[in-house]
Amino acid sequence: MSDEHNDPASACGYGEASQLDRRDFLKTTGVVVVGFSIADKVAAQATGDRASGVQRGLVSGPPDPGQVDSYIAINADNTATLYTGYVELGQGGPTALRQVAAEELDLDLDQVKDVRVDTFVSTNGFTAASRTAAIGGTETRAAAAEARRVLLEMASEQLKTPVRDLTVTRGVVSVRNSPQRSVTYADLVGGKSFNRKFEQVAYNGGIELPRKSSDNAIQKRREDYRIVGTRVARPDIAEKVRGTFQYVQQVRVPGMLHGRVVWPRGQGAAGISNPTVVGIDETSVTDIPGVQIVRRRNFVGVVAEREWDAVRAARQLKVTWEPFASTLPGHETLFDSFRSAKTNDLIDTNTGDVDAALSRGVHVLSASYSGPFQSHGTMAPNCAVADVTKDGALVMCADQGIYQTRNGVARLLGLPVEKIRVQYYAGSNTYGSSCYRDVAQAAAIMSQEVGKPVRLQFSREDEFGWDNFGPALLSDLRGAADADGRLVAFEYQGWTHTGGGLDTTSQLALGAPPAGNIGGGSPGPGGGGLFSVHLSQMDMYDVPNRRIVNKRVVGPGYLRTGALRAPMDPSTFFALEGMMDELAHAAKLDPYEFRKRNISHRRWLGVLKAATDAAKWTPRVAASKLSSARIVTGRGIGLGTHHLPQNQGNRVTYAAAVVDIEVNKDNGLVVAKHVYGAMDAGLVINPAIVESQILGMSVHGASLALREEVQFNQTNVTSLDWNTYQTLRFGDHPGVTPIVVQQINEPSSGAGEEVLPAVVAAIGNAFFDATGVRIRRYPLTPRRVLAALKSV
């Protein structure tokens, strides 16, 4: 287990124990593995791994992904260490990877350790889009199986016994019929390299490619698993409960200054309203001792020895900014703007003859749905610590992809990427592209400018005002069912806008426009990108005539966007599942029965049955038991997934939710009382972790559906705190019944995002069941609810 709660100064090579000044440390960074009690083991291996190309801790990575040594080391005490680049965001991924490695190596879980994710140590794992189990698990399983084969080959030679006659328990290899003849993994290879290559799984356009060689080690049969598939506690939980866990916000190093950025109050239109400094009144902070103003082009910040002095200086420093242009549509007219804008259209799916089938349908409906820009809303603003010298840089931050952060920091500092070392420290994680990369880059700029280590933490206003928001979506749908309630046609057109990139800091410091495409997207196949409706890949409904059109709004003029948990899916499924409920109601069918008639896929039916069984679903037509009472109740069903085929080799995670709600007709308050969330993520490595994920997704989904909406006017974002950006409070959280549908013989497909859109959809459908009124724009805020109830 890592000792992340230890003193960060000594753990990072600073302080008396290291006997290095900060410049020498940065020159020799890698002599110790930062923050871990197994540093001596890693350092010892570093000199022995040169033949395999792995010089762990000595040179910048990532190491060769085809080398066993890049992932696993066997230590002198007969334990193993994992070096995967997947981080702990609260999802339990690193624990699951330890289980995978222990299983394939025939070790107990307490014999498998991991280390802080570090660009001088770890593989290039990007912790996003449910990749940890799906991709990281595949990599780890293959490397561990190959490592076990090498160990058994060595044991066979030493014990003069064929491999087939050997058995392994806790890393001790014994002769099956003569157990006194044995040798440990440590005896065989402890502290030395494997120097063995293996072939990793590769993808092209989302399709898993065949292996060039069939010589990879045979992995353990699923029926022989004893660790994978079991409920194992995450090792970080106890420390977090006790308050002893060390977050990045708590990292301190000798000689460190505290920093704050000074940016405009809320972003304007990305690509148009680029912040430009007109002037700085340096006398406005002269009453605060020791304050330094940091400026690089339009990047402005302050540093001080005391954190409170930095906070005060950031509030007092008078910076005159060029006024933002009034080019935003305002959140109330956002979707009118989408509809009237020029778009690049991507025909995602066009099968059959949708128009002809719609004309023949018995139950034919059309509707428009919409979902807003939404914030990541970190519980604690993002933070990073950077120490930059002319020889290199060390950055400690909370980032889903440390190698991506390394590249951005190198560009800003004008240093080669191999001189930048990035280490992961957990933050208040947000499942998506919040401001963690911006804060790391900003800390690095400040450190380079002042020549000292700088700890930079954003303010709440910085975090909300300059977030990379989850994108808004406008959806037009048409659907038709026959007399038996079977779908005959379905059309989905979705308008969205993306742009601004993820690098406000570099935009300010380099004087460059925002990175990435500002809206539009290419009109051909593959042009949909991340923020697209992926319904063609979602095969839950059997519809012979189907058309899906992604309408990418062209040009600047909207907020900057980034990935927010299950990107686009809450709005997509709010619309899709809302239309399915509308068709069920038109056909006078129970919502569950309607879905069963139109789904043949066994795994979609499996999660649907699991959720409705847990909820003790009673068949009836929605809104058939309306009440005149002041407080009314309803329940709804929703399906959901998050399918990014380029990341997961066409692996789908299947999810369904049933949600019970209460609606107060007097004040418009909607309360999600209970969520029954079911998920089929293929082989679930750790059911307890997945249940926790379902809990988190259910609460998050309820908050998105009922509260969260970024406010902005024609010039800038106005949601700058927890009052102007509302979320569910703890007392409003629903009860949750999580259901894991284990599929031990299927590939793991990830479990971090899929129940969330199902919950958003189910809440919308439950509101109709309770009131007989359909709201097609979320969140279902009291103001929106009262207006809808008064309109009928």
Image: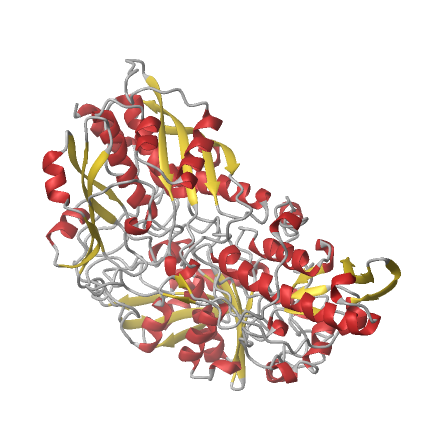
Q: Is residue 89 left or right of residue 638?
A: right
Q: Is residue 330 left or right of residue 296?
A: left
Q: Say if 510 sits above or below 107 in the image.
A: below
Q: Nearer the viewer, residue 606 or 728?
A: 606
Q: Is residue 607 left or right of residue 514?
A: right
Q: Locate residue 174, reporting x and y percent.
A: 82, 61
Count up the numbered dots.
Answer: 0
Q: Say if 605 sits above or below 283 in the image.
A: above
Q: Locate residue 649, reporting x and y percent.
A: 42, 59
Q: Locate residue 153, reporting x and y percent.
A: 73, 71
**What residue is rendered at 81% in x and 68% in y?**
161
Q: Nearer the viewer, residue 582 or 154?
A: 154
The quadrant of the image that shows the C terminus is top left
| Residue 185 shows up from this direction | yes
The coloring applied to the image is secondary structure
The residue at the far top in this view is: 628
**What residue is rendered at 14% in x and 46% in y?**
353
The quadrant of the image that shows the N terminus is bottom right
| Residue 783 shows up from this direction | no
The residue at the far right in this view is: 180
Q: Say if 685 sits above or below 48 in the image.
A: above
Q: Locate residue 121, reporting x and y percent.
A: 60, 73
Q: Nearer the viewer, residue 580 or 31?
A: 580
Figure quadrant of residue 6: bottom right
Q: Is residue 504 left or right of residue 100?
A: left
Q: Nearer the viewer, residue 237 or 181?
A: 181
Figure quadrant of residue 362: top left
